[in-house]
Image: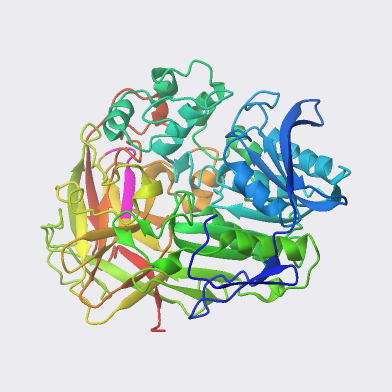
Amino acid sequence: MKATCSLAVIVFCGWTCYAPLSFGQAPDPGKYSAEQFEVKATRGHKAAMRDGVRLSVDVFQPKADGRFPAILIITPYSNNPGYQKRGSWFAQRGYAVAVADSRGRFDSEGTWDPFDPKHKTDGYDLIEWLAAQPWCDGKVGMMGLSYMGWAQWWTATQAPPSLRAIVPEVAPPDPFYNLPYQNGVLVGVMLDWGGANAGRVGQTLGPGPYGGFGAADRRTSDYMQLPYLKLNELRGALDSPWFEKWIRGNVASDPYWRGIAYQTPQSYAKVTVPSLAATGWFDADFPGSPMNYLAMKKHGATAAARRPRMVIGPWPHIFNQNRKVGAFDYGADALINWDGYVCRWFDHWLKGITNGVTNDPPVHVFVMGRNRWHAEQDWPLPQTRWTKYFLHSGGHANSISGDGSLSTSPPRATESAGFDTYTYDPAKPTMSPFTGGHLEDGAADTRKSSSGPDVLVYTTPPLDEEVEVTGPITAKLYAATSARDTDWMVRLVDVRPDGYAAMLCEGVMRARHRDPKRGGAFNADKLSVIEPNRVYEYTIEFWRATANVFAKGHRIRVEISSSYFPYYLRNLNTGADNIGLETNSIVAEQKIMHSAKYPSHVVLPLIPRR
């Protein structure tokens, strides 16, 4: 990944040393293996899996005698393009990098299904195949971003004996926490991804070749078509049986999802290796990294596994590539020497070099607004002051022109209005400001999307002093709907003095996934029942955290709606067990309570002034 030019390079004694940044808080690679080998590339190795299917593996290795530790990448995107540069970089430093096509993709045999549980055993078999090669010293690590991060966790939970360390970059969590469902809400960009990856090779289906990054009008038109079950067929994918499993399997307890799940205490307890994760504040797969960090601390099988590392920067899903994301430039320090940092990690765990990796701070976070890295001792930050911000209004919080306000004072019994209402019509969904999906747009301006009566807006007065919000966020809504199901969406926004409303993060929930006693959609065999016009308590964990300084004069804003289209597919409000099969919709009248009895609020992780 891209290295920042703000680091001074010194080469000596077979190592590369990067002097730390001026404030000494960024993830500093320190000493790591220097470039010293020519590279030999061989393509089309065939590694046999336990069921006889052969996977295609390309290898980049030092052109030298001897045995070297190996690094494995498993990809569904073809092992030919894009990997030669990174593979060669590590090979020059004494590693054999193997890039394997996933089962059923490109040059690998077998049948493709993104969530086939065989991917777990394939990872195990590939690790042990590599360890047995005459040019490998028997020690293997893994790295790679996004789906390749999934592949690492699937593999690690099988505990292959030759695996020694993993680097899951922007790795997603289990599917129902993020993609293709987010708290029960279908995420459009993942359905775009499903269309683009419906066959053995990549293909252009839907708005754009890689899953909808552009062509917003086409995407909007596609997503208005019903039922959702037919979306891939509508786009021309005639043979993707697993897509139907995605739509029909609308609770995480479905056997299809259980087969590939890795985020259970039992699975984490099988992981023996240390993990180094990277994600970004605008990463569409953000929740995977902090969830895995916390779970490994608690459940990891070894002392090393219980000491995970995590780096969070001001990045979208394709991380550490640009200092500017959307409308904001986060400065030169936003980019770090990530591959150097990874190399130092592997130097210790694969080569056995004592280089101080085990003494590094476990967490590095980049705080936006201050545009500075901070080394932290844990996540959430130990110094966090969890602070409730309550919703208030005179009953007309609709749109940015309404009377909604936000404060740390709870509602009083004497307040004139204890709720706000709005209408959610699935035929006229609230449009999000994102042109290319969350992956690339960063802190987009929400003024246009929050200008209609179908969005409730609650804003603080201009701040008298800066407020740092760093960490996970939870919304507690007391809400009622006239329908038998609907969606709730809550967003945190930084309003600048010029009016720009920068969206930082959000939480979403399908109403019928609400029941905490049954574990919501994650553990229940069936969904909750929602009685029309009855007030329920909804605890919505934001799927992305943030690290942002609300500067003096800025305002903190919370927005609430029931759609944010086309990134999220619409809830049709019918109350059906599976909206993916529905062809009709119902208009819902929504009520958000904020009274002394029903004090709706968000909990913000405030950090004392540094």
x then y, percent, for residue 599 = 29, 65
x then y, percent, for residue 251 = 51, 38
Name the one closer to the observer, 196 or 539: 196
Where on the picture, by quarter, is residue 430?
Answer: top left
Residue drawn at point x = 33 percent, y = 23 percent: 226
Report the quarter where the N terminus lies: bottom right
Residue drawn at point x = 53 percent, y = 21 percent: 240
Residue drawn at point x = 15 percent, y = 50 percent: 451
Q: Is residue 401 left or right of residue 323?
A: left
Name the one closer to the observer, 321 or 85: 85
Where on the picture, by quarter, is residue 495?
Answer: bottom left
x then y, percent, for residue 484 = 32, 37
Residue drawn at point x = 71 percent, y = 69 percent: 15
Judging from the image, the colouring scheme is rainbow
Determine whether 207 is above or below 603 in the image. Answer: above
Report the quarter where the C terminus lies: bottom left
Determine whether 566 is above or below 277 in the image. Answer: above
Q: Is residue 194 left or right of residue 352?
A: left
Name the one closer to the observer, 602 or 88: 88
Would you say residue 420 is visible in this rendering? Answer: yes
Would you say residue 527 is visible in this rendering? Answer: no
Q: Is residue 563 left or right of residue 234?
A: left
x then y, percent, for residue 169 = 57, 53
Q: Residue furthest top?
A: 238
Name the one closer to the observer, 15 or 404: 15
Instruction: Read off the magenta span.
Output: 483-490
Q: Is residue 115 magenta?
A: no
Q: Say how many tags the image has.
A: 0
Determine whether 97 is above or below 493 in the image. Answer: above
Q: Is residue 484 magenta?
A: yes
